Amino acid sequence: MISRIKPLGIGTQVVVYALLLIIALGMVYPFYYLVSTALKTTQETSTLPVVWWPASAQWHNFVDVMNLPNLPWFQMLVNSVFVTVCVTVGQIVTSIMGGYAFARLRFPGREALFVGYLGSIMIPFVVLMVPMYQLMKNLQWIDKLESLIIPWIFSAYGTFLFRQFFKTIPNDLEEAALLDGASRWTILWRIFVPLSGPIIATQATFTFLYAWNSFLWPLIIISTPAKKVLTLGLLDLQGGYATRLELVMAGSTIVILPTILIFLLAQRYFVEGIATTGLK
Amino acid sequence: MSEQVKTVGAAAVPRRGRTREKVVWTPARTREALVGYLFLLPNLLGLLIFLAVPLLSSLYTSFTDANIFPTNTKIIGVTNYINAVNDSTFQQAVSNTGAFLIGFLPLSIIPALALAVLLHSQIRGKTVFRVAFFLPVVASVVGVSLLWRWLFQYDFGPVNQLLGLFGIAKIHWLESSDWAMISVIVVASWQAIGYNMVLFLAGLQGIPRQLYEAAVVDGATEWQQFRRVTLPLLTPATFFVFITSLIKGLQVFSEPATMFNGGSPANSALTVVWELYLEGFRYFKLGYASAMAWLLFLVIFVVTLIQFRLSERWVNYE
């Protein structure tokens, strides 16, 4: 451990910085490669020595990838955005309601149900895959966006998180509102939710991330190109246009960039969200 | 539901009161209970339909010969389980997953710990570094796996170019069965380090400053402080990181399936979940795939149980 009491000596500092810089380069370089390649010409992607930055940036690659025959990339982008927004909003709403019920309302069976919720958090998705597929088939949701949204707007973990947070809100506010004749519904949305900004932001960023990046489930359910989300589109892009690396990388940039931007904007919530997941 | 498994500490389980208070069902109290059920209903219904019922149904399916045609499904006992255990492809997938874990666990945990310790010291620009290390975590697994596929490209991929600078001969990262799994390990670890680092940083923040002050007074060197103060007090974080990484690693799928879309050389990067996916959704042997899923679930369940047990014992909560 580098002591936290005395500041580091110059020598140590240089070594630490050099180490950190080298590792940071290794972490960030792939993204540089991603964006620089997305802006190259086809020829520049496969010449030696490696072209570090294209002679002139080919921004039209991003337009070209949207206009490929047999690969409705733009439609897939729309699908991805739609699915992600629905899942995020839906999960937050149901988790807030469930979390409030667990935290503030007394009803028979509450404790038993809550233990069930906690237990269900550890169930891995792989055991649910086959029956979920059969269920989607029975509902005739195969190859439909419903299957990417509806099953995913319920979260035991989100409910747990909101319950924990709501438990920390003082009783007085709620009691005063109840005396004034406010309904529980009003109390939840007018008092509790406005106080929950940070936790909502944390949960929303994580849900957004999982929904946007989800792959295995769409892979099982969706096969029609026009119904696909971007993660599936990327596989098709790689499969059909591997000789045009700049297009593959432009596509990858479109998939990767939104979550990076959200992370940069909501950095604090990410870090806090992870730090509180289980370390207690 | 999220595809990723999250673990929650045992401390969150509510204690049942020793004596049950007698509830007087006044109209207000009845109303409160009703409202409670109503608020929980959407959530509860969803989890029942999309989690509890599928869970039971998957156990049942694992004892049947279910396939793409829903008619004529017969119960065949533990045949699927026996077939899976005796199947050479499944055995290969299991040993591949084991090989993945042997590389992935140390490579994603030890550098994360080192980085956390470095970033916890008094240096400028911490935030910038933290952001840089964390970037891979948020990026789409499919996106970065595809990206790395090109970084590993034999002729003009940057990885081989870099090795060339040090006089190392080019490596067939993706085409050789010796290197395929190593490539997967590199990509997965690269993506996991930042996540683990943040967990370690949170753990480091919980170590009281006075302990270091006392250690310095006693003449402890920096290495001794790390060995005797930081590491022991970091066990809860280390343990948590280890368990979550293990559970994640056991289910590795997207990285190999994207990097080797269409199949890895001699199936050298075929993992358990990938094999499960192929049997279930390429060949539609739904019963067989369910049996494999339950075998995997059993392992994850045991790991989680061990976590609950051990986290009560040797983890140092102060």
Image (cartoon, coloured by chain):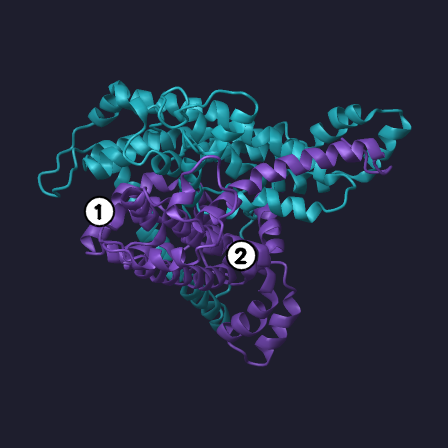
Chain colours: A purple, B cyan
In the image, what residue occupies the spot 36% across and 22% down? B176
Residue B172: where, in percent of width, then height? 40, 24
Residue A254: where, in percent of width, then height? 42, 54
Residue labelled with disc 1 = A134
Q: Which residue occupies the foreground of this view, B44 or B235?
A: B235
Residue B6 seen by the camera: yes
Q: Which mark is residue B34?
A: none
SS of the residue under disc 1: helix
In the image, what residue occupies the spot 21% across and 56% down? A139
Instruction: Check the residue under mark 1 and report the chain it is in.
Output: A
Q: Quadrant of residue A45?
A: top left
Q: Residue furthest left?
A: B72
Residue B233: where, in percent of width, then height? 71, 32
Tell me the CA gap for discs 1 and 2. 37 Å
Above or below, A37 against B163 in this view is below
Q: Which mark is residue A261?
A: 2
Above or below, B83 against A118 in this view is above
Residue A38: where, in percent of width, then height? 44, 50
Disc 1 crowd, CA 10 A, few/some/many (<14, 14-19, 20+): some
In the image, what residue occupies the spot 15% across and 41% down? B68
